[in-house]
Amino acid sequence: MHLLRDRGFRHATPSDITPRAVYRQRRQLLALGGAAALAGAFGTNAHAQAARPGKLAALPGTRSALPGALVMDKPTAYADASTYNNFYEFGTEKSDPARHARSLKTRPWTVAVEGEVKKPGTYDIEALLKLAPMEERIYRLRCVEGWSMVIPWVGYSLAELVRRVEPTGNAKFVQFVTLADRRQMPGLASSVLDWPYVEGLRLDEATHPLALLTFGMYGEVLPNQNGAPLRLVVPWKYGFKSGKSLVKIRFVDKQPKTSWELAAPDEYGFYSNVNPQVDHPRWSQATERRIGEDGLLARKRATLMFNGYEPQVGQLYAGMDLRRQF
Ligand code: MTE
């Protein structure tokens, strides 16, 4: 399909890039503290290199200049972000995706763009990787289950893709369909959800610059368990809105059903904005446990409205009753 040229973005320079080794060094510094540690971490760069698993390809991105795109909280350890996952296609235990997603084949890979667009078509992953300049965005991710992480993602605004496929006047919502392949995904044998996993956004949510089409994390391509080769990250909504391993993006005129709404309509609404004032029917949403801070004495954190992105996204919901449209 014809791709327009990118406009107005800075390309990555080496000094903008924060690969995983650097995060690891920063974490070592935080953990060890003091001048000796400083000398150690910086003096033996080879040490940090050697400690890397290092089998994933580098995917650097320019640090984003978008307001709200770089939260200052300490990033979650890569080891936690890549082993404590929800990806039900590979099982419902947190450790299942890291164990079972190894076999996921992420090449060749295409994403179909369908429905109310002037330029429908099938995009190859290699073309998508080049569609717009990659940025690094450090987002909080808040799961509806009450835990959160801080992850340096790499990707570009979903709006970049949406703009190029030219939605028609009838396009009001966008549906995201993720891979459902029984041969590769043992979790599909379970009826916990209707497969494929589907999610949706209103068109103005999908084109909000913070909605990230994501290809990597911690300076590298996504590990399979985090949704390789591409996924969505919508940081102001509960994590389940961020579909992994996308295969289809459909522009539609009516609000599409989502997998979680179909599974439990009283518990999971279409909007699913992070909202500490609207409890899940079975638990409070007022606080969260930050993964990595879960010692006995660790205090829970207060959950923030729209996960802390209210200044950027609050306007999208002006006039809505968020208790009813949860
Ligand atoms: N995407 C698919 N295809 N299948 C899933 O089960 N789980 C969601 C979301 N995307 C899920 C998915 C949920 S509940 C969360 S919290 C996030 O992925 C977790 O993303 P992470 O494992 O990268 O932190």
Image (spheres, rainbow, N blue to C red):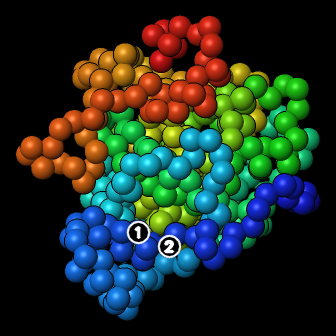
Q: Is residue 221 at all visible to an observer of this figure?
A: no
On the image, the x and y values in percent for residue 196 come to 53, 45
Q: Disc 1 marks which residue?
A: 23
Q: Is residue 72 left or right of residue 24?
A: right
Q: Is residue 24 left or right of residue 237?
A: left
Task: Label 2: state its secondary structure.
Answer: loop
- Give the tally of numbered discs: 2
What amino acid type is highlighted by mark number 2? Pro
What amino acid type is highlighted by mark number 1? Tyr
Q: Disc 2 marks which residue?
A: 19
Q: Is residue 280 left or right of residue 184?
A: left
Quarter of the figure with residue 34: bottom left
Task: Label 1: state its secondary structure.
Answer: helix
On the image, the x and y values in percent for residue 238 come to 44, 34
- Do the residues bearing badges 1 and 2 touch, measured as CB atoms within 8 Å? yes
Q: Is residue 303 at all visible to an observer of this figure?
A: yes
Name the residue located 50 percent from the left edge and 13 percent from the top edge. Answer: 322
Whether disc 2's CB lies below 8 Å from ligand 1 is answered no
Q: Give neighbour class at mark 2: few <14, some 14-19, many 20+ (Cα, 10 Å).
A: some
Q: Most extreme residue toward the left, as rendered? A: 296
Quarter of the figure with residue 8: bottom right
On the image, the x and y values in percent for residue 127 come to 77, 67
Quarter of the figure with residue 52: bottom left
Query: Which residue is nearer to you in this view: 2 or 34?
Result: 34
Query: Which residue is nearer to you in this view: 229 or 264?
Result: 229
Name the residue located 27 percent from the left edge and 35 percent from the top edge. Answer: 301
Q: CA distance from mark 1 to mark 2?
A: 7 Å
